[in-house]
Structures are given as C-alpha cells and as structure tokens.
Image: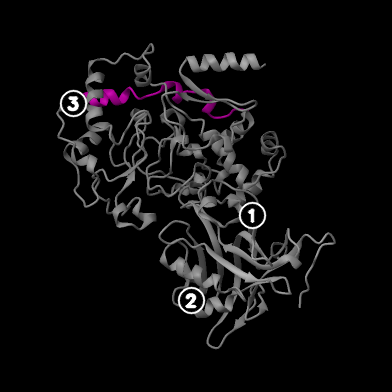
Amino acid sequence: MRGLEEKQENNSTTIRFSTTFNGEELQKKEWIILEKDSLQFTKVRYYISNIRFINKQNKSIPCEECTYLIDAFDSESQDRELPIAISKLKKIQFDLGIDENTNTSGAHGGDLDPANGMYWSWQSGYINAKIEGISPSCATRKNKFQFHIGGYAAPNPTIRTVTIPIQSSGEIQLDLATFFKKTAWTKAAQLMRPGKEASALASILSNSFTNHE
Amino acid sequence: MNRKIILYSSIIILLGFTTLKKEGILPFTYPDYWPKPYYDIDKNPVSESGFQLGRHLFYDPLLSRDNTISCASCHLQATGFTHVDHDLSHGIDDRIGKRNSQALMNLAWNKSFMWDGSINHIEVQALAPIEDPNEMDSNLQTIVHQLNQKKKYKTLFHNTFGDSIATGQRTLLAITQFVVMLTSYNSKYDKFIRKEKGGNLNEQETNGYALFNQLCASCHQAPLFTNQSFKNNGLAVDPTLLDWGKYNHTKNPADSLLFRVPTLRNIQFTKPYMHDGRFESLYEVLEHYSEGIHQSPTLSEEIRIIKPLTNKEKIDLVAFLKTLSDYEFLYDERFNYPRN
C-alpha cells in the first residue's frame, strides 16, 4: 500500500498514475489469464491534461500546464508532482486526452512533442490513448490488438473529463480489466482513427478509472 | 536607433508594404492591401538562424528512411516548389503516392493543408510526408535522434534555440520558419495592380483578366488566387484511386469529391494540374471547365455557371494566367539549396 509523499514545505504532492488489470500493476508482455482468453500488453500510453484540484470547499483550482503523457511501463512518467498539499485536496478532476485548442495550435513540446509517437501524422491531432498487445483470441496479424483512441472534432470528440475523490494512497488508477470487459475487443481488435467507435471506446476507458465519480 | 526604426518603417509603409519587424527577427513582408495572414507568426518568429535551420532541413534527405528523399524532392523551387511533370509524386523506393504535389507559396494564409484539408496547422504539416510510407517513410523520433548526432545541426539548433538539443517540436518549428517565408507577390499581375513598371497587360492578357474575373475569381480570388475553400469542380473520381477528397477524413457525405482550391500563382510552371495531376496543360484545364464537367450531387455552385469557351477565350485566359508567374520568387537565392 503506497503512502502519500508530502514535501517538507507541505505545498506539493506526488501522485502516482498507475495502470492495472484487476488491481494488479500492469507488467509489459506478461500473460494475463482470463476465463476464456489470455492477453498481454506491449504498449499502454495515455494523456492526462487540464488537471483541476477540487479543495475541501469544493472550489476548483486549475493546475497550470499540467499535461502528462503516462506510460504504463515507464515509472518515471507515472509519478507526478502536483503543486498542492494533499491535506487541501478533496478530489482531482482531469481530462483523459488533449483538448481541441491544443489540437489545433501547431507543434507543442515536452509531453506534447509529436516525436513521442502520440500524434497522427496523416490527419492532425493527438492520440489520446494507445493500448496495444497480443491475444490468441484476436484473428489479426500476429494476434495483435491495437486501440489508438483519438479525434478532437465534432461529431465524435474523444476527450473525456474524469473526477476522482482523493485516495489515501495518492494513486489514480486506470484498470484495464474494466475496459476489456466492456468492449468486443476480440472481434474489433484494431481501431486507429477518429469516429463513432473511437468515441465509444473513449467513454469506456474514462469509466475505467477506479473510484471515478 | 529608434529614429532609424521610425524612418525605416515609414519608408516601408510609404512603399505600401506591411512589415512585421522586431529586433533580431527577419521581416515578414507582404503588400498592405493583402489580408492579414492566418498564421500568427509572432508565436514562432522567424530568426535568420531559424530560417537557415529550416532551409537545411527542407533540403536534407536525412528526413527519409534511407536518406534519399528530402522535401525538395517533391517541392522544387524553380517550378513553384512543386514536383513538376509528375501527376502523382514518387517517394522512397520509387513508390508512387495518390496525390499531386502542391506548390508551396504564401502558406501563412492557409487555414488548412493537403488537398483534403486533413492537416490543420502549418507547424505540423511536415509530419504528413515524413511519416507517409510512400513519401519519406520515416518518423519524427528517428529524425530527432539523428539530428542530435550531427555537428552541423547541433550548431544550427544552438544558434536558433539557445541550446543544441533537437526535439520534435523544434524541428517542426524550424521547418515552419523556412516555409512560411516562401511568399510570392511580385508577378506581372501584381505590378499591374500596383501600377508599377513591368505591369502593363497586353490585349490578350487584359481580355483574359476580364474573363477570369467573370468565370474564375469566385473561387480563385485575388490576391492569393484561392479563397481557401474546398470545392467539387466537376472531376469524376478516378476509379484507380477512389480519392473522395475531404470526405476521406470528415466522413461527411457533403464533403465527397471536395478538394482544396489551390492558388493559381505561378501556375504556368506547376503542371500537371488537379489533385491527381490528370491535366497536363492549362488548355486541358480550360477544356474541362468548358466542356468536361462531371455532374455529381456535391458539384459546387460556382462551377455550374461556367459556360463553354471559344478558342480565343481560352488563349486569352492562359495569357492572363501566365501573368501570375513571379520570377523573383522562383529564383530567389534565399530559398535555394544551401551550399554551406
């Protein structure tokens, strides 16, 4: 059980953005056995942006320039220092994905740098979440499943707002078991463009955060 | 120093040009009767070193998987920065793509890019050819890694950004600083409009100009000679390509067969014409508008009013279109292959 990490000065907190499957931390290329399927993950990355802190008085405080590319297999990307003391926090609200303004304002840097591989070259826009892996249940080349969830424009924007009450563990957990339970992932194992399907997956993914409201 | 700036700016303004000028930044100049650019150049101001870095990148085949294809491979300056005489461009391994290379000029006024508008910002346009498997078949991460190994680029990045680290963002911003400077507004037609020496239209050109205003100017609107819209100009779909244009990325049936209205500046040199290069000459283009329009549900309103042209009218129109050639732009040494 991870404890909170509070700085001496008491005005920042390290939050861990973890990715799990049925509560177990995701390990790259490790087989997960389900009732009728087995699967392993090779790539899981997603954007968290526009973080807002909801304090005990229910006031919303924006976190300046808090846009993070979380990589489930890179622990450095998962631990983020947020500029607020945990004692003041009631909930965290954020967007899963990148907003329209950022999608239409050219080349950005840092976690938003297109060289990170989370930006479509053939049609401008960020890939909000990439989930890739293998399962014998997928009748695709090399049994791959690949979900690239993106698209910012109407009628199928894929950005979603998520609100999570602060846990004593200081962890924001995305549990992929929830996602895989709710999609027909063995039948439609590849999605790599904006549209209705991407929008549906975005909703399922945003509801896969543990304890979300 | 202040007096010099006031005097210099006054002279520029008196000459009728708008110059955006800040210290250390290259001036971005265009005629004062032009609309303002769509791109906010202040967000990525062009410095001399940024311009040179972008220019080196533009001409460097390092941007392709096997170091053979550069931007200039399909965008040749002397022919308006397009791939002249190729209906569809060929890229790496002689692979052939699905579209005709567009002429690059006055890009700061573009609201979107590519024939179908799928790129929404000048700074990210270069990603499309870089990562297209038929064009350069590379990726930004690999390019950034390679740039960080090369002494020439370490220096150029240092001069531009303050340290020698290449990032994806910086690479794209530098390319933008070069291509945004490709401005063309000194053709014979422009001199005619500004009543400058060299701007006398002869009888054919004058007749052509009148016809142009009557039949073409609604979409090919001066001074950019495009109104930046997407139109179905009566081209039947090529069954070997099945390219539905803007529909490809919007999936909106109303966008089927809609393609960008390209600029007609320097059109004399940018053959062949249309999104798939199906017309070899301007006469073929005029024949299409005159007699060859293909009816379809999304055919644009403006096309419906074009009437059959006589041979004399076609000759006059072509004569006028040739007045849009800007030799100062086509042979501007600032834009050619860097030799240092």
Across and down, in percent, residue A18 comes to: 67, 70
Marks 2 and 1: CB-CB under 8 Å? no
**Tag 2: amino acid:** Trp
Magenta span: B313-340
Label 3 SS: helix
Identify which residue is drawn at 43% across, 68% down: A197
> Is residue A119 shown above or below B110?
below
Q: Nearer the viewer, residue B78 or B166?
A: B166
Which quarter of the rendering shows the C terminus of chain B? top right
Q: Chain of mark 1?
A: A
How far apart, in angstroms, are the residues tagged by discs 2 and 1?
28 Å
Q: How is the image coloured?
A: one colour
State the count of labels: 3
Residue B308's label in the rendered image is: none
Q: Are marks 3 and 1 in contact (CB under 8 Å)?
A: no
Of the numbered discs in the image, which one, if any, rests on residue B313?
3
Neighbours of disc 2 within 10 Å: few (<14), some (14-19), many (20+):
some
Label 3 with label 2: CB-CB less than 8 Å: no
In the picture, measured across the screen, residue A75 lies left or right of residue B303, that is right
- For residue B241, say whether it is visible: no
> With respect to residue B201, does A4 lie above or below?
below
Question: Which residue in the protein does label 2 denote?
Answer: A185
